[in-house]
Image: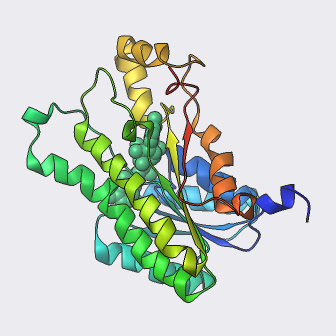
Amino acid sequence: MSLLDKFRLDGQTAIVTGGNRGIGRAIADGLADVGANVVVANRDEETGRDAAETLADEHDVETLWVETDVAKEESVMNMVEATVEEFGDIDVLVNNAGVVSNYELQDMPLEEWERIFSINATGVFLCTKYVGQVMIDGDGGNIVNMSSISAILANYPQPQPHYNASKGAIDGFTNQLASDWWQYGIRVNNISPGYILTDMIAEVRENDPELAQIWKDDMVMDEFADPEVIAPLAVYLASDASEYMTGEQIVIDGGLTIR
Ligand code: NDP
């Protein structure tokens, strides 16, 4: 097997939560590009179906869209059931779906704290629990969680303590689960991106150029990145190319955290 062959996922089944747009869409594209059959799991039907169809057309793989709300247990169970029915097994889970908002803690309603945690943290728990059971019953697999540099530093000047805490939860979860689940042949790793140009960030760049400039000033590379920069790392962590790696948090941020 050549070195590049270790990155291939031919015939494997990968679920990407939030695979319809942004970073998740780019990761779904990367996984399909190396041969994986991809399940796009998100809420919005139009973009979800479109992503699944485009991936199949462009990469000659099988795809499926499953309407999924990662914060709801029954919806996640349905996602797993539909995937197993279609593909028989699950090899890769990318827990990418996530949401952000800005609030000073003293003004934050409990409902907002709970909304962010239900998607960013509980969603990762639910998807990992039910997909993990299929991996445990099968041949193991690889889980990639989407954390953030917000788990390791304070964002400035926007206040987002609930978001940062939810991403910190993912880091702790990844460490512990990597240790618990290696016995089943399951590896668990994190990606921690910096500021990536998705809907979340594009809105700020357009409406608040001063804030965008503050963020850019922190970066060595001095510019936001397109979501596509995350895909090669996700493929690496989802494939045998990273066979000796588990429980890691990989930062990819244009040099922001070193400043
Ligand atoms: P976007 O805002 O572009 O997209 C969010 C994605 O999450 C959509 O696909 C959305 O699907 C999905 N989603 C949200 N809530 C749910 C839910 N309850 N159930 C299922 N899917 C849901 O986000 P990004 O691409 O920017 O971010 C992706 C991940 O990367 C997130 O976890 C985010 O925290 C993380 N991240 C992003 C950074 C950035 O700079 N962009 C930096 C660091 C981390 P739908 O359209 O159906 O709602």
At which x and y percent is residue 8? 78, 62
Q: Is residue 34 left or right of residue 95?
A: right
Q: Residue at x 47, y 54 (%)?
A: 96
Q: In this view, does 213 lie to the left or right of 49?
A: left
At which x and y percent is residue 185? 61, 77
Q: Residue at x 50, y 47 (%)?
A: 21
Q: Is residue 70 visible?
A: no
Q: Residue furthest right?
A: 2
Residue 159, compared with residue 13, is above or below; it is above
Quadrant of the image containing the N terminus: bottom right
Q: Can residue 76 be seen in this view?
A: yes
Quarter holding residue 72? bottom left
Specify the color scheme. Answer: rainbow
**In the depicted view, which residue is nearer to us: 106 or 90?**
106
Residue 200, compared with residue 124, is above or below; it is above
Q: Residue at x 31, y 41 (%)?
A: 164
At which x and y percent is residue 15? 54, 67
At which x and y percent is residue 30? 68, 52
Quarter holding residue 53? bottom right
Number of numbered discs overlaid on the protein picture:
0
Q: Residue at x 64, y 56 (%)?
A: 237
Q: Is residue 104 left or right of residue 180?
A: left
Q: Residue furthest front?
A: 179
Residue 233, compared with residue 53, is above or below; it is above
Quarter holding residue 121? bottom left
